[in-house]
Image (cartoon, helix red, strand yellow):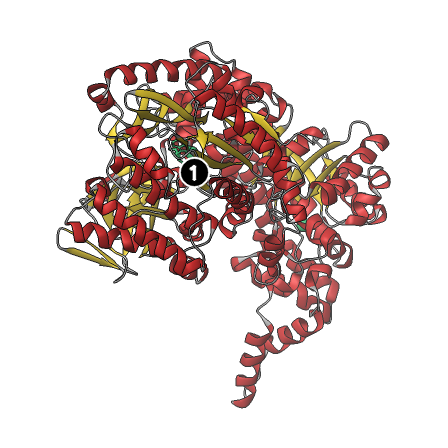
Amino acid sequence: PKYVFDFVEGGKDLKDLLGGKGANLAEMTRLGLPVPPGFTISTEACRAYLAGGTVPDGLFDQVNAHLQLVEERLGKALGDPANPLLLSVRSGGKFSMPGMMDTVLDIGLTDVSVQGLAAQSGDPRFAWDSYRRLIGMFGKTVCGVPGEAFEHELDAHKSHAGVATDAELSTADLRHLVDAYKKVFHDHTGREFPQAPHEQLYLAIEAVFKSWNTERAVLYRRQERIPQDLGTAVNVMAMVFGNLGPDSGTGVAFTRDPATGVRGVYGDYLANAQGEDVVAGIRNTVPLQELERIDRHSHHQLLSIMDKLEHHYRDLCDIEFTIERGKLWMLQTRVGKRTPAAAFTIAAQLVDEGVIDLDEALRRVTGAQLAQLMFPRFDRAAAPEPLAVGVPASPGAASGRVVFDAARAAERATAGDKVILVRRETNPDDLPGMIAAQGILTSRGGKTSHAAVVARGMGKTCVCGADALDVDTDSARFTVDGTVVSEGDVVSIDGATGEVFLGEVPVHPSPVARYFEGEEPAGQDALLDAVHRLMLHADRSRRMEVRANADTGGDAARARRFGAEGIGLCRTEHMFLGERRALVERLILAETAADADGEREAALAALLPLQRADFVEIFEAMDGLPVTVRLIDPPLHEFLPPLEELTAKVARAEALGQDPGRDGALLGAVRRMHEQNPMLGLRGVRLGLVVPGLFAMQVRAIAEAAADCAARGRSPRPEIMVPLVAAVQELEAVRAEAERILDEIGGLPHVRIGTMIEVPRAAVTAGEIAGAAEFFSFGTNDLTQLGWGFSRDDVEGTFFPRYLGMGIFGVSPFESLDVPGVGRLVRMAADEGWAARPDLKIGVCGEHGGDPDSIHFFHAIGLDYVSCSPFRVPVARLEAGRAAV
Ligand code: ADP
Ligand code: MG
Ligand code: MG
């Protein structure tokens, strides 16, 4: 097969084959932009390599053939002692994984060709600098030599020469450094640094293939929900040099501010530097505007290229570029990552600019981004003076105990601490700590540093480049103006302003959350305006209704402000809590009373007015909108004191020679009702069929509350939902009793009676069940538990981490619906339900109703509504809209 593609052969739509970087390098080449020549080895070759463990047949022949084309174009050859061609070998999968995989620069330098490069460039210092970079990078990424071993030598040479930065090292210093690096290489690998340029190239290609499966790359993909089996492409291209003196340099830039979405170029530039120097935050960069002063011509050309790219991709692009002695080269572009606020703002801007339509704008924002915008912010009024101010790199308000290394961060987070990871700068090895932390704080680097890019990608709060901080990792503390902050001390960081505070700062609702609460924005705010317009379009476009899960009048009112179109799940169990527990106890103990029926009726009669009042409150808040009330679901003994507590109490009383009285009777009941597997026990519809009068009381309370509201001119729309039904006979029995009560009370509009579908047997017999149900609501939490046969409350602490690690599932099936398994049950049940009763209304309640991926699935199979917690309602509205455009 053809594994290798010249840049002129590819294009931006070939990301599956060429990876994002390769596809976009090809696209830029075709647009006629100045891209150094090169070629891409496909992801297919990587997959073949990873499957077989060896380089696929013929790959290196194809590489050599393409290399020859590059050599001809440039009139230089790899390994030519007089005029050597140098190459970069770069990873790049379909989805961007910043810094997660490997890149090797300056391939082709040897003891011989370094002399050629020195002569040809007229700059020996540059040649030796490049050579030491190659040995370091090659040693680290290809041969696994620890990076610190090289850094240690670099530091030693800098202090020996009495200079602060690597740019000040002389040619002689660098020659010594090369010798030292070679020794480090030999000490760690047991072999000499390879002097055959083609061997360097082949080994680097293999190393890039392998870097797909490094621990940090696997972890990053799991975090970002990127499939593990895609493989990376390898880009091989001619080097251009930003380290050829003051008229050379390298930089990164965005066509709009990725933090706020504000229009206008934004970026960082570093003169006389190569490659990763910018991203690694090794030296402080200057803002891109400065380039205008340094190199007017390149600056001008860069802006015009950025403009061209924005128009071409019709979106914010980020780019990497290098200037070699006044000549601009493009090294990378892609549609850039951005903060949630920027995502909304840019989408709306592009609509205003006539670049995209509203449907496209809606596709470009996500529910996850909206959820982040609704997170609380620091309460400015309650904040102390900031300790320091850094670069606001990724928004959010995070407080936690400071830790100074990734392993510690992960450790303390697992133990339940909230932590802020503090580093001088981060590198890919810090990933586990970044994932574990609430926020990330660095003392070096700008908006394009590793910490900033990764944090933005993960939606983590990040303040970087807070250079007032003197970070001392070894003694686990940092100092600012004499204030010492040690591991375990609490700090708060504001990713929107860059402020760092000592201690925990209180939070309050974000402007977007306040907007959803119905508060009018003060003045013209670009973000709120964008959110408003995109929500409007989502509501206009979506087919599914969005309801909320709410159990109280307060929750119902809030859900309504957030745009809920009814309640999809009103749980009634809280109506049995608090002071009402005594009544539940009485109900349970009635069974053993002399006049069992009388006692039970008395207990239920006492509960009735209380429940009725609860329902009145909820129907008022949801006036005119449907409210699906679920009859009581959990086992009754959950309302009794725990067994151990009662046993101890009774034993104490008996030891003191006292009569345990009511406690003794309760203990008897608890023992009697004890179940090995309460989740599979006497609960839901079973309870309603076994405890006489319980469901009847609830139905009566619903009906009377509705009648009461209606009498006051309101339009209550109650629906009655029966939980845990597995057989149509169960539902028929409940329904018969409920209809009798509804008829008896009378004067109500039709009250629909339906069921949850949350037991696999119900899903499988949905056609029959539809005969007795006017609506279905999928309880996907229980359906997932019972479908997989594991309990949600127990999996996290036992085998889930391992299962996620092994890739048995990429994301917890409780977080996002398991489409092939549980999803299949849902689809099947819905189809059979509709076949039996075409007007059957079908929705979903439970966590999945607020999960973006699951919402798209529910839309696709034609469900009528989703119901989720009030705070997720805007997210569900947005995603239901996105699913429909
Ligand atoms: P990442 O995916 O981590 O950004 P890249 O493959 O983009 O890794 O390489 C890192 C850096 O190396 C780039 O930002 C660029 O500055 C530098 N680089 C890559 N290829 C070349 C090249 N051909 N000439 C000069 N610098 C290069
Ligand atoms: Mg890059
Ligand atoms: Mg349930």
Q: Is mark 1 within 8 Å of ligand 1?
A: no
Horizontal and vertical percent position of residue 735: 79, 43
**Residue for point 22% across, 47% down:** 173
Residue 516 visible in rendering: yes
Q: Is residue 128 above or below residue 293?
A: below
Q: Is residue 434 above or below residue 275?
A: below
Horizontal and vertical percent position of residue 531: 44, 24
860 relative position to 393: left or right = right
Front residue of 758 and 634: 758
Secondary structure under the numbered disc 1 in the rendered image: loop
Q: Amino acid at mark 1?
A: Gly
Horizontal and vertical percent position of residue 439: 36, 47
**Residue for point 35% across, 47% down:** 426
Task: Give the quarter of the image for residue 295.
Answer: top left
Horizontal and vertical percent position of residue 405: 35, 57
Judging by the rendered image, the residue that carries numbered circle 1 is 108
Q: Residues within 10 Å of mark 1 (few under 14, many from 20)?
A: many
Front residue of 672 and 450: 450
Q: How many marks?
A: 1
**Residue for point 60% across, 47% down:** 811
Task: Give the quarter of the image for residue 673.
Answer: bottom right
430 relative position to 613: left or right = left
Q: Quadrant of the N terminus?
A: top right
Q: Is residue 16 above or below residue 300?
A: below
Q: Quadrant of the C terminus?
A: top right
Residue 148 visible in rendering: no
